[in-house]
Image (spheres, rainbow, N blue to C red):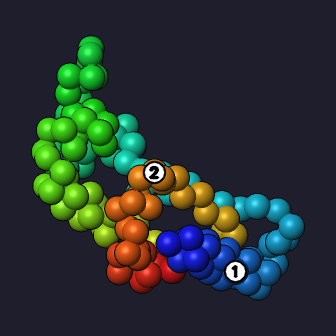
Amino acid sequence: MRLHSVALGTGLLGATAVTAAKNGLPVDKIYGVNLGSWLLVEPWMLPDEWVNKMGGERCDADCSACAASEFGLVKKLGQEKADQVFEEHWATWFTEKDVDEIVAAGLNSVRIPWATGLLNHWWSGPPNFILEVA
């Protein structure tokens, strides 16, 4: 898993650095983007998808009593259904088209927040969508 994560990061970084150099942008500076809510879902970043597509909830008061986080969603849906929901999200939230747009914009850095629990989930290897993006 670590090798694939490194490959993803270095592949994106290398491709965007080359693009930045071709566009005359200085490559000694970081030009980047945050891919929040892809591998670590942050409901505030995708409120409609969280509620309408993934089955999460918005909470005004006690968020421990509703599905306002990944943990809460797993409690609500059960592990098997939650796995399906998250795998669908991971496969569609960030795609190869997004990588192409990052490269075209001349960015040379990508921040990918993710939960360490994914190591257990992907212990036998990352899913195809990670390999496709890498």
Q: How far across and down, in percent of the image, does residue 8 sit?
A: 56, 75
Q: Secondary structure at mark 2?
A: loop
Spot occupied by residue 5 in the image (x, y as percentages of width and height): 55, 71
The amino acid marked with disc number 2 is Ala
The residue at 52%/52% (across/down) is 113
- Identify the element where label 1 is drawn: helix
Image quadrant assignment for residue 111 = bottom right
At horizontal 61% and vertical 73% (from top left) the residue drawn is 6
Q: Within 10 angstroms of label 1, few (less than 14), some, or many (20 or more) residues?
A: some
- Viewer-proximal residue, 76 or 10? 76
2 is higher (above) or lower (below) than 31: below
Q: Gap between marks 2 and 1, in whole Å?
A: 24 Å
**Which is more foreground, mark 2 or mark 1?**
2
Q: Could you tell me the amino acid type at mark 1? A: Gly
Which residue has dot 1 on it? 14
Residue 104's tag is: none
Q: What residue is shown at x 48% (from left), y 53% (from top)?
A: 116
State the image coordinates of residue 115 (x, y, percent, origin top left).
Answer: 45, 51
Q: Give the side of residue 98 with respect to residue 80, left or right.
A: right
Q: Residues within 10 Å of mark 2 (few under 14, many from 20)?
A: few
Residue 80: quarter of image: bottom left
The residue furthest top is 61
Q: Is 60 drawn above or below residue 16 in the view shown? A: above
Q: Earlier in the sequence, mark 2 or mark 1?
A: 1
Q: Quadrant of residue 110?
A: bottom right
Residue 96: x and y in percent read 43, 79
Q: Indicate whether 69 appears above or below 77.
A: above
Q: Can you say whether 37 is above or below 71 in the image?
A: below
Name the residue nearer the viewer: 41 or 45.
41
Q: How many marks?
A: 2
Disc on res. 115: 2
Residue at 44%, 61% in the rendered image = 119
